[in-house]
Amino acid sequence: MFRKGLYLKMKRIKPQGIKELLQEYIKHRGLTGALNNARIYSAWNEAVGENIASYTKHRYFKNGVLLCNIDSSAVRNYLNSNKAQIIEKLNGILEKKIIKELIIR
C-alpha cells in the first residue's frame, strides 16, 4: 500500500531518460560535490601525467581552489612554474571553468 505523499513524489508527467533520472537522484542524495571532486582528481592525473601524479600525496578542492601536496621538491618547482598551463588543461578536460586557482605545496 502506498502512502499518498510517496505516490505523488514518484508520479511522472512525462517520460525521462536515464541521464535525467540519474542527475535527479545524485542531486537528491547530495552526491554532486563528491562526484565533482572525483572528476577533478581524475582530471589532475590526466593533465599532469601519471608519472608526476604519482608524487601527489594529497589533493583538496573547494570554491574553485585546487590544493595539491607534492612529495618531490623538483616536481613541486616544475608544477609551480607551469600553473597557468595546468589550470587551462584541467578546465579543458573538465569542459568547464571550475578551477580558478592552483596551490602546490
Image (cartoon, rainbow, N blue to C red):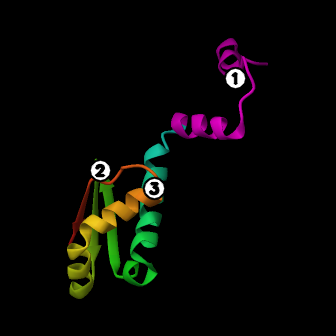
Main secondary structure of the magenta stretch? helix
Q: Pointer 1: residues within 10 angstroms few (<14), some, or many (20+)?
A: few
Q: Amino acid at mark 2?
A: Gly
Q: Which residue appears at 56% of the width and 41% of the height?
A: 26
22 vs 37: above or below: above
Check disc 3 and report its element: helix, strand or loop: helix
Q: Which residue is mark 1?
A: 10
Q: Which residues are magenta?
A: 1-28
> Left or right: 42 with respect to 103?
right
Residue located 59% across and 34% down the image = 24
Q: Which residue is mark 2?
A: 64
Which SS class for mark 2?
loop
Residue 8: quarter of image? top right
Q: Amino acid at mark 3?
A: Leu
Foreground: disc 1 or disc 3: 3
Distance from the alpha carbon under mark 2 to that under mark 3:
13 Å
Q: Which residue is mark 3?
A: 94
- Name the amino acid, label 1: Met
Residue depth check, mark 2 versus mark 3: number of the one nearer the observer? 3
Instruction: Indicate the position of residue 25 as horizontal and vertical percent values.
Output: 60, 37
Asked whether 100 or 36 is in front, the reply is 100
**Quarter of the rendering containing residue 37:** bottom left
Nearer the observer, disc 1 or disc 2? 2
The foreground one among 85 and 9 is 85
